[in-house]
Image: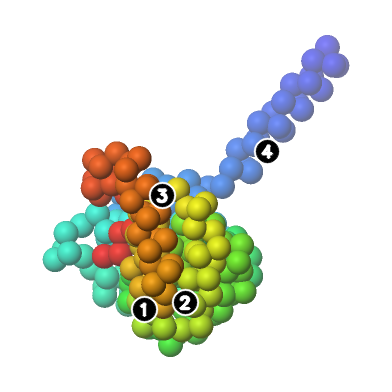
Amino acid sequence: MFRLRCGSSFLRRLLHGGTVNRDQVLQQLQVCAAEDQVLDVVGKNKAKLTVNHVSTAVGMLWQFQREKPQMLRTVMVIRCHPQFLTLRVLAENKIALMDDLTLVDMLYSFLRFNVDGHDSLVQQLVSEAWLRIDRLPMESLSKFSMCLSDLNLQNSPLMGHITSIVDQRLSSIDDARILTSLMISMSPLVSPRLRDALISRAEELLDTMDPAKFNNPAENSAVHAKH
């Protein structure tokens, strides 16, 4: 009987601990159906927000916006919201904790909300991405190159470094959408030799890709949804 009571007590503690350990903030974010709900969760949990929470919230805000027709988007309203400022401050304070994909995704999303290129958040995200540039996966590198184009840095040494990386790793790129995004971003710096190689590789990838998938916006990654 004593063993049964001990076992029952242990199970109750274990189950209770499992409930407590669930990420309740993340769960609240994941059930949000609109921007105001996301911002409300942010406002109520400022002291608890981790890198993952901030990344999820910012990504969801942009996802809700990009699902709307251009005329119905409320980018300016969200950008001026006090809780969006909270996300900006938290993101800037947590840059060192971000993994590579989160770092570039965060930069991309904030630029979609027209955060100024001279803002310290944007500058620090760009600087940190530059430090990690040689290890970024191609999808993130493509998205980063789009961010640089948004910042009018098409002719910068940083874009030149991306061009060099693409030249070295061209044969490893297996997604035509990623390659075409890179080609557009790098176009001012591409040599005739590399241009021919890029076109050849793009043709190879397009020949093996389902045209419906390439043309269907629902199938395209957010990295290619610039507006």
Give the spatial CA distance, label 2 vs label 1.
10 Å
Q: Which mark is residue 140?
A: none
Q: Are marks 3 and 1 in contact (CB under 8 Å)?
A: no
Q: Which mark is residue 175?
A: 3
Residue at (25%, 42%) from the top-left corner?
211
Q: As displayed, is residue 93 above or below residue 32?
A: below
Q: Which residue is mark 2?
A: 159
Q: As displayed, is residue 198 above or below residue 84?
A: above
Give the spatial CA distance, label 4 vs label 3.
44 Å
Please tell me whether mark 2 or mark 1 is closer to you in this view. 1
Give the secondary structure at mark 4.
helix
Q: Quadrant of the C terminus?
A: bottom left
Q: Which residue is mark 4?
A: 17
Give the spatial CA distance, label 3 vs label 1.
22 Å
Name the amino acid type tagged 4: Gly
Please tell me whether mark 4 or mark 3 is closer to you in this view. 3
